[in-house]
Image (tube, rainbow, N blue to C red):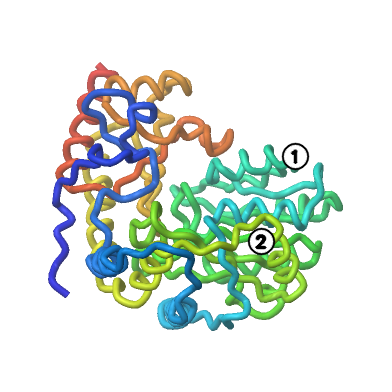
Amino acid sequence: MSPVNFDEQINRREVPSLKVHPRIIGEGDVFAAGVADMDFRAPAAVIEALQRRLNHGVFGYETVDDGLMPSLINWLDRRHDWNVEQRSILRAPNILNALAIAASLFTEPGDGVLVQPPVFFDFFDLLKENHRTIISNPLILEGGRYHMDFDDLEKKAADPHCKMIYLCNPHNPVGRVWSAEELKQLGDICGEHKVLVVSDEMHSDLVFKPHRYVPFASLGSNYAQNSITCISPAKSFNIAACCSAFTIIENETLRTAFQVENSRLTVNKNNAFANVAMQAAYEQAEPWLGQVLIYLQANVDLVAERLQDIPGVELIKPEGTFLLWLDFRQLDLSTDQLTDFLKIKAGWAVSRGYAFGEQGRGFARVNIACTRAKLETALGRLEMAVSGLNS
């Protein structure tokens, strides 16, 4: 495969992109780093497959191509050493839909669902909208790295009202790629107390060496039987607007209930373009993914290097994802002051840290899946803004 030009400047305002929409970032020249997608073209293999499907010209109802599920199964086996049977895989419109159905099916209104903040903000909204009680098991930041508080998890999982945990693996926004040992300890606690593990593994393919993504359900039968795994190629191949998701459930009782609910809600319909995009990604776009990971790692390295000259801003070094968790607490700004400082003084439109839970105050999530030139300019603006603040 020839090298991909990730330095290509693409005007995302030519389409109604959420990432650069005025209601998200306002007007003017702003570093749009809030919405979690990449500024890069999708893999050529995906674009070509979509073009062939478009050229067919007939867009009636379709079944799933016979090759889609095998392409996913082969991907999980080859890349992540996870052997999944096709009968265990269900389709979902998106991962949030699968998370919502899991909470609706396997908990009751008022039941407790564990989350590990700072964590993906949609977890909170989803649980509130479904009238579930959020039980917080905050991550602990020590020495610039987050880890799980297993003592607190044990105590809260033992509450008979606690029925489920939303696991984020790899973790958004702190960038941890949980080890097999950490996942097993979580799984053992949840298994002992009959807490169902629902794992959002959206960022599973976006992991930096030498770290390795471990699917929770791959740890062994007892872990697989007490879990639901939600995955999608949306982030890995930058096809969020034209793909769907998969729910992998090895427990037959849980899977049957999920199938019935999918049918009841009629969320099991097919989209021809989503099917084509996902199959092409899994079968042909692995070289593209390898190149994008190298480019993203270089962007991480650039941020780490430049922050050495920007006092008061620290990088939580990511092990995966293209999202950086930056610590601005040393600037001693209130939540609103930090938001205004980043937007007005630095020209950064980011995800505000407190949206990920109380533990995120003073932090911000920054998407670095952009061109090196754009990132260089943004870092220069930040350096000037912090210099002005300190002076």
Q: Residue at x 51, y 64 (%)?
A: 270
Disc on the earlier residue, 2 or 1: 1
Q: Which SS class for mark 2?
A: helix
Callout 1, which amino acid? Answer: His
Q: Give how far across and how far down residue 130 sits, in percent.
A: 71, 42
Q: Is residue 250 visible?
A: yes
Horizontal side of residue 367 vs 132, given as left or right: left
Q: Give how far across and how far down residue 108 sits, in percent.
A: 81, 49
Mark pair 2, 1: CA separation: 20 Å
Judged from this view, the residue extending furthest toward the top is 391
Point out the image quarter for the N terminus: bottom left
Mark 1 highlights which residue?
131
In the rendered image, the vertical position of residue 192 relative to residue 124, given as above or below: below
Point out the image quarter for the C terminus: top left
Q: Is residue 289 visible?
A: no
Horizontal side of residue 184 vs 326, given as left or right: right
Q: Residue at x 18, y 56 (%)?
A: 6
Q: Residue at x 44, y 53 (%)?
A: 175
Callout 2, which amino acid? Answer: Asn
Q: Which SS class for mark 1?
A: loop
In the rendered image, the vertical position of residue 388 relative to residue 376, given as above or below: above
Q: Are marks 2 and 1 in contact (CB under 8 Å)?
A: no
Residue depth check, mark 2 versus mark 1: number of the one nearer the observer:
2
Q: Quadrant of residue 275?
A: bottom left
- The image's mark for residue 262 is 2
In the rendered image, the vertical position of residue 24 relative to residue 322, given as above or below: above
Q: Give how far across and how far down residue 380 sits, in percent.
A: 18, 33
Q: Quadrant of residue 382?
A: top left
Q: Give how far across and how far down residue 354 sits, in percent.
A: 52, 32
